[in-house]
């Protein structure tokens, strides 16, 4: 009997790093769950590309900033594939606004998407991983978590929180065969520009990169592919900086 394929859930998978992670994992033989919040057409396109690689792909739209949506997204993925073996918490907001002008709603929205979503999705997917004795969670932090940036207080706080969550879960579940790691990308040349993370900001940060250029989504996805592979099985509780040598 052929070995059943493992399944990966990638949030924010309609474009950029999420898309590259979804297609990279599909190329490695994982069935993929493609999640996005609004652009279904983009997510469906990623799913079609994944299927051409010989795997199954499911599109589940939903706002990961809402706990109920996190539960529904994970539930549909688990219902389809039996369990989620790999969770990639990629979806994020990166708004820029002066701290003194930030509203409570704006603060809570960033924390909900950038931090809380990783909590609720991990909680939903971990039972299946524990039952199998194998699982991978990949979170995303970023230079916001390392440096902090003026005008991006909620992003920096949320990404610091993701790093703390990563370390805690790695210690709690490592003995059960589940590894939890974080990737910290440097400035990335996006396939599709984010409304809240301008190319101007990325051009400013690229000055810190010794390689003298932005990274690509595929280069970031390569690290995610390593972390979920058998070759990466001894990497746990780490934040891997993929930033061209940018100052830390």
Image: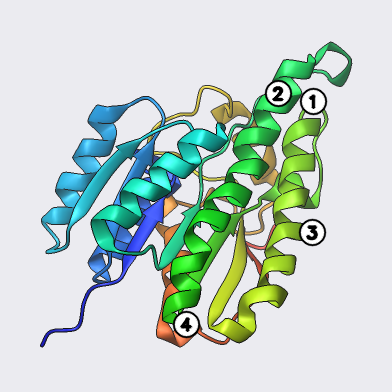
The CA span between labels 2 and 1 is: 5 Å
* Figure check: 103 above or below 65: above
Density class for disc 3 (Cα within 10 Å; few <14, some 14-19, many ≥20) is few
The CA span between labels 2 and 4 is: 41 Å
SS at circle 3 = loop
Query: Badge 3 is on which residue?
Result: 248
Tell me, for residue 133, which label it has, or none.
4
Residue 97, image x, y percentages: 75, 19
Q: Is residue 133 left or right of residue 170?
A: left
Density class for disc 2 (Cα within 10 Å; few <14, some 14-19, many ≥20) is some
Identify which residue is drawn at 33% across, 52% down: 77
SS at circle 4 = loop
The CA span between labels 1 and 4 is: 42 Å
The CA span between labels 3 and 4 is: 35 Å
Q: Quadrant of residue 36?
A: top left
Q: Quadrant of the C terminus?
A: bottom right
Report the number of discs. 4
Tell me, for residue 151, which label it has, or none.
1
Q: Earlier in the sequence, mark 1 or mark 4?
A: 4
Q: Is residue 175 left or right of residue 32?
A: right
The CA span between labels 2 and 3 is: 21 Å
Q: Nearer the viewer, residue 237 or 217?
A: 237
Density class for disc 4 (Cα within 10 Å; few <14, some 14-19, many ≥20) is some
Q: Earlier in the sequence, mark 1 or mark 3?
A: 1
Question: Can residue 12 be seen from the camera position used here?
Answer: no
Question: Can residue 133 be seen from the camera position used here?
Answer: yes
Point out the frontmost of discs 1 and 4: 4
Q: Earlier in the sequence, mark 2 or mark 4?
A: 2
């Amino acid at each position: 009997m052929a070995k059943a394929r493992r399944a990966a859930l990638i949030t924010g998978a309609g474009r950029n790093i999420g898309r590259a992670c979804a297609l990279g994992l599909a190329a490695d033989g994982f069935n993929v769950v493609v999640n996005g919040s609004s652009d279904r057409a983009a997510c469906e396109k990623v799913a079609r590309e994944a299927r051409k690689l010989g795997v199954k792909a499911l599109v589940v739209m939903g706002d990961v900033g809402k706990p109920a949506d996190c539960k529904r997204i994970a539930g549909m993925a688990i219902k389809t594939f039996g369990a989620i073996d790999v969770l990639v918490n990629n979806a994020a907001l990166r708004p820029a606004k002066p701290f003194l002008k930030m509203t409570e709603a704006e603060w809570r929205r960033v924390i909900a998407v950038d931090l809380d979503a990783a909590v609720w999705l991990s909680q939903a997917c971990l039972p299946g991983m524990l039952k199998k004795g194998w699982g991978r969670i990949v979170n995303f932090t970023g230079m916001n978590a390392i440096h902090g940036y003026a005008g991006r207080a909620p992003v920096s706080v949320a990404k610091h929180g993701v790093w703390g969550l990563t370390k805690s879960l790695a210690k709690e579940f490592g003995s059960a065969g589940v590894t939890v790691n974080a990737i910290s990308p440097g400035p990335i040349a996006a396939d599709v520009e984010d409304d809240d993370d301008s190319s101007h900001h990325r051009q400013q940060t690229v000055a810190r990169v010794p390689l003298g250029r932005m990274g690509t989504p595929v280069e970031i996805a390569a690290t995610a592919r390593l972390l979920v592979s058998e070759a990466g099985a001894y990497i746990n509780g780490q934040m891997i900086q993929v930033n061209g040598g940018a100052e830390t």
